[in-house]
Amino acid sequence: MKISFVALLGAAIAATACSDQAAKQARSDSALARDLALAGTQTAQPTFQDTSVSPAPVKAAPKVKEPPAPVRTRTTPTPRPRPQTISQPAPEPVTRQQVLASAPAAAPAPERGEIASGSSAGLTSTSKVCTSNMVGDKLAATLDEPIMGSHGAELPAGSTVVLEVASVQSGDKAENAQITFRVRSIVVNDKTYNVAADVVPTSSLDRAKSQDADPNAKKKVIGGAIAGAILGQMIGHNTKGTVIGAAAGAAAGAAASKAGEKWEACLPAGGHLRLKLNEPLVLM
């Protein structure tokens, strides 16, 4: 039987490896034996060292996983549907009657108070006025009593009535001296109302001779008497004729003097008059 050279070579290498392994094991065992023998001859001395107690380890907080960033995607907008146009019938025209019917009803106007025509009341003048005054001069009077009307209208007592001199007339006789008035306005609660009314004095007028009488009146009487006496003497050629002539002359002079006299009339302060409305007076 023939043994190949390769097989012999492998066997030789394996034998060499086994011998080397056995030698290494023997050397290891010998060193261990020496260490054990040395340890048995020495007494071990305990040693003490300061040590600090380490704190218990703190568990680390678990890491929070952050959510992944959203992925942006581009979307195509959906087209909106176009509104459909729906034809509607044209609205019917609105008539005037419909507008008036739909409009809210207006609030009724407040009823106005009115003093009826013909209403009258007494007045008291606050100042003196005479025929020596001029036409158009003003004076004030107060209403003596209230005048009532419709819807609560009232001219209260004490209201101011503005009067105006309408005409003046001096006379040769006391009774011929006259003065008349007219109403200009009435003041009620600081409101002035123009009125159409008549007003007449109810008190007697104070009458007196005018201070502007003829200053030569006395001379006229004396002069008339002298002229009459002379005329009587010329006619009768005696005393009786002279006396008669003087009397006649004096009478003529007195008549001439009388013709030059003037009388004035005055309505005193506090004099009374009567007012009468000629037209209705509407109070606001």
Image: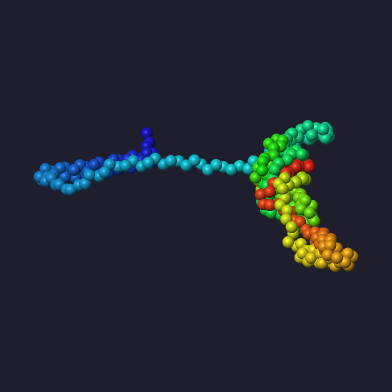
Quadrant of res 143: top right
Q: Please tell me in which quadrant of the rendered image residue 29 appears.
A: top left
Q: In which quarter of the image is the N terminus?
A: top left
Q: Residue farthest to the right?
A: 235
Q: Is residue 192 visible?
A: no
Q: Where is residue 193 in the image (x, y as percent from the top left)?
A: 72, 47
Q: Position of residue 74 (x, y in %)?
A: 63, 43
Residue 145, quarter of picture: top right
Q: In the displayed structure, would residue 153 be above or below residue 213?
A: above
Of residues 199 and 223, the one drawn nearer to the viewer in this rendering: 223
> As rendered, which of 170 and 127 lies closer to the eye?
170
**What sort of colour scheme is used for the picture?**
rainbow
Residue plotted at (14% across, 47% down):
47
Q: Residue at x 45, y 41 (%)?
A: 65
In this rendering, the count of numbered labels is 0
Left or right, 94 with respect to 10, comes to right
- Choose between 166 and 24: the one closer to the eye: 166
> Is 281 situated above or below 128?
above
Counting from the top left corner in percent of width and height, residue 144 is at 66, 43
Where's residue 151, x and y in %? 70, 35
Q: Which of 275 and 7 is in front in this view?
A: 275
Question: Which quarter of the rendering shows the C terminus?
Answer: top right
Q: Most extreme residue toward the front, as rendered?
A: 238
User: Residue placed at 67% from the left, 52% from the top?
Assistant: 269
Q: Is 222 on the left-hand or right-hand side of 36?
A: right
The answer, for residue 258, to whether it is visible in the render is: yes
What residue is rendered at 73% in x and 47% in y?
A: 201
